[in-house]
């Protein structure tokens, strides 16, 4: 999803004494353009839950050094999927559910960790064998 603008809003909550309802007024103030660079990275895991493998989709606004790794629920790195320069655009990596040693990982919750410069994103995925 590419965000091209956002809307600044004011929210007014009005309650009347003795009434059991709440009236909400929303006032749209102005549209504020957002450049794609202000949202330089996205990350997702599909399908989720997965068996035996999943695809990690990520988007970069510009060429960057990235690091993509898989961690288990205890915070241990299971496998490093990518460490290097990646061009701008949308990319897909596949994790086959195996550790760095090539052994099959157990069913459970895993975290996909994407580092791009100072930005860090996590996405969770459920491996169901």
Image (tube, helix red, strand yellow):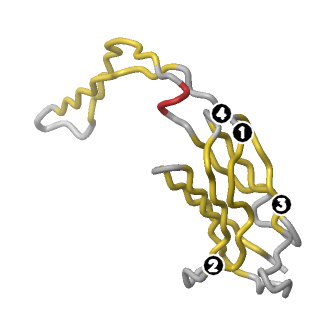
Choose the circle earlier in sequence order: 1 or 2.
2
Mark 3, residue position:
94
Q: How many marks?
A: 4
Q: Residue at x 40, y 16 (%)?
A: 32
Front in this rendered view, residue 60 or 110: 60
- Looking at the image, do the residues carrying marks 4 and 3 touch, with CB atoms under 8 Å apart? no
**Does residue 27 appear to the left or right of 112 in the view shown?**
left
Residue at the outermost top position: 30
**Vertical order, 54 against 29 (above or below):** below
Q: Residue at x 76, y 66 (%)?
A: 49
Choose the circle earlier in sequence order: 4 or 1.
4
- Looking at the image, do the residues carrying marks 1 and 2 touch, with CB atoms under 8 Å apart? no
Q: Residue at x 70, y 70 (%)?
A: 80
Q: Position of residue 90 (x, y in %)?
A: 74, 39
Mark 2, residue position:
77
The disc at residue 113 is: none
- Looking at the image, do the residues carrying marks 3 and 2 touch, with CB atoms under 8 Å apart? no
């Amino acid at each position: 999803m590419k965000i091209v603008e956002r809307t600044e809003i004011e929210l007014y909550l009005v309650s009347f004494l003795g009434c059991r309802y709440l009236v909400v007024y929303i006032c749209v103030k102005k549209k504020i353009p957002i450049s794609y660079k202000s949202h330089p990275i996205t990350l997702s895991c599909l399908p989720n839950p997965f068996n035996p493998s999943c695809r990690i989709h990520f988007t970069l606004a510009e060429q960057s050094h990235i690091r993509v790794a898989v961690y288990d629920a205890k915070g241990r790195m299971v496998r490093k999927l990518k460490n290097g320069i990646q061009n701008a655009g949308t990319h897909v990596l596949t994790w086959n559910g195996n550790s760095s040693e090539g052994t099959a990982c157990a069913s459970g919750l895993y975290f996909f960790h994407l580092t791009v410069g100072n930005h860090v994103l996590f996405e969770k995925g459920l491996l169901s064998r």
